[in-house]
Amino acid sequence: MNNGKIPTSAFLEMRKEVLNQWITGKEVDLDEAIAYQASIKAEKRFSARLAKAIMEKETLVQPRAGVALPAEHIKLLKHLQDEGTADLLPTTIDSYTRHNRYHEAQTGIDESVRTGKSLLNGFPAVNHGVSVCRNIVESLNVPLQVRHGTPDARLLAEITLAGGFTSFEGGGISYNIPYGKNNSLEKTITDWQYVDRLVGYYEEKGIRINREPFGPLTGTLVPPCISHSVAILESLLAAQQGCKCITVGYGQCGNQNQDIAAIRTLEKLTKEYLGRFGYRDVVVSTVFHQWMGGFPQDEAKAYAVIGWGAATAVLSGATKVIVKSPHEAFGVPTAEANANGLKTSKQLTVMLKDQIALETPLLVAEMDIIEKETRSILEAVLKLGNNDFGRSALRGFEAGLIDVPFAPAQCNANKALPARDNNGAIRFLDFGNLPFDEEIKAFHRQKLKERADVERRDVSFQMVIDDIYAVSKGRLVGRPR
């Protein structure tokens, strides 16, 4: 693990091994790739579109989408662009590629060609290579981002950035802890330092690539202070390697007051910590992920969840919102359902464009507690690693000072346990080893006691179980029946 910016000579030497992982790595010529990126017009660059949104105070809409074959993938994205009116487009990568299993991805491509339908759950960009990626970029009118879930995304980043994508999502923590069981955190942070150094290299050559840590983590009752701490650490790691355009994210929790407070504090704290360590020239934007938990099977009810997320995103001042579809409960949506989720969200973002949530005493109080909790975690973690961002993250997880609820990773303590309070905001039932003082702990205990008193039951793990399934059953708080 590097404790500073990777020297250019060392980075260029590392690239030789990375590009040899699969045959399409030979297609990457870094100087030619930089020249290609320079030819992409501003309206198709992620960083430029985000900057415009910040200036005009608009919330952009972006879906998730990806299929196995290039022609079908282009057809899908064009539908989301033209019919769904997406402001930004993704290319969601398939699971084999996410695990660097390129031979199996190739089998999936071949079988998709044979059967005429996508047998992969995303687009295998590494197998298709640079020229195919460029064909996708050139077929569309809006900026494109790579979205995936890859612990080791080094070759994927090389191929897709050379292919003209102008934004790359993920991070060494956020694409480890929620996604796998046995991945070494030290290795994933190191591998993502390479990705960030690649983005930083493009930046040095005048090409701005947007970087976006994955905000929702497990997407299940994640308190804002946990996702904030991970996002800020990944932002520091990215900035250290030269990234200048960073989008920090947060997954909708459901209590609108808490969600608005979360986006506002996330932006504030990210800028604060970047500035503290000298990264004052980084442009920070925010992304709000619509509800990541269980969805109602009834389509009309699903639209209500989508609209609720879109409205909260706008009122929070988020730069963009990642949109769900009304078929969320059933798996991968059709192009039409995906476009409908976009249109629902776009209508809300347009209608509410000139409105923001007022800073009520409740909102100010929620922002205050999120800031206190997040600073408590980050200060303890940074101290443990002597302000070495990677080492701090590693030691912080080892000590349980950061603890992501319901994560499969063995390097995660899994001792902290969340539950909703009487108003649906997420609090801590069990603090594990989180470095909170007694004032913060007393706040959480009181909030859960208020709910227990209303429901006439004890504060217990049953609340957690009830809360996990509540939204899919039409409620936010898992009340006893």
Image (spheres, helix red, strand yellow):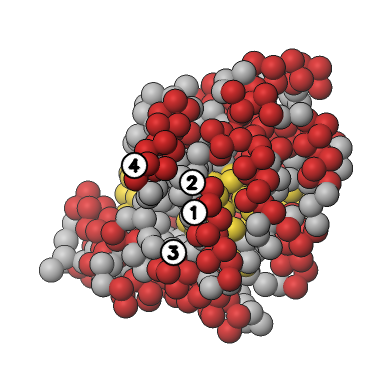
Which residue is farthest front?
A: 114
Q: Nearer the viewer, mark 4 or mark 1?
A: 1
| Structural distance between the alpha carbons of marks 4 and 3 | 31 Å
- Specify whether residue 395 is in view: no
Answer with the quarter of the image where residue 27 lies: top right
| Structural distance between the alpha carbons of marks 2 and 4 | 34 Å
Q: Are marks 4 and 3 in contact (CB under 8 Å)?
A: no
Residue 69, numbered label: 2
Q: Which residue is mark 1?
A: 72
Q: Earlier along the polypeptide chain: callout 4 or callout 1?
A: 1
**Amino acid carrying mark 4 in the image:** Phe
**Amino acid carrying mark 3 in the image:** Ala
Q: Earlier along the polypeptide chain: callout 4 or callout 3?
A: 3
Q: How many marks?
A: 4
Q: Nearer the viewer, mark 2 or mark 4?
A: 2
Answer with the quarter of the image where residue 480 lies: bottom left
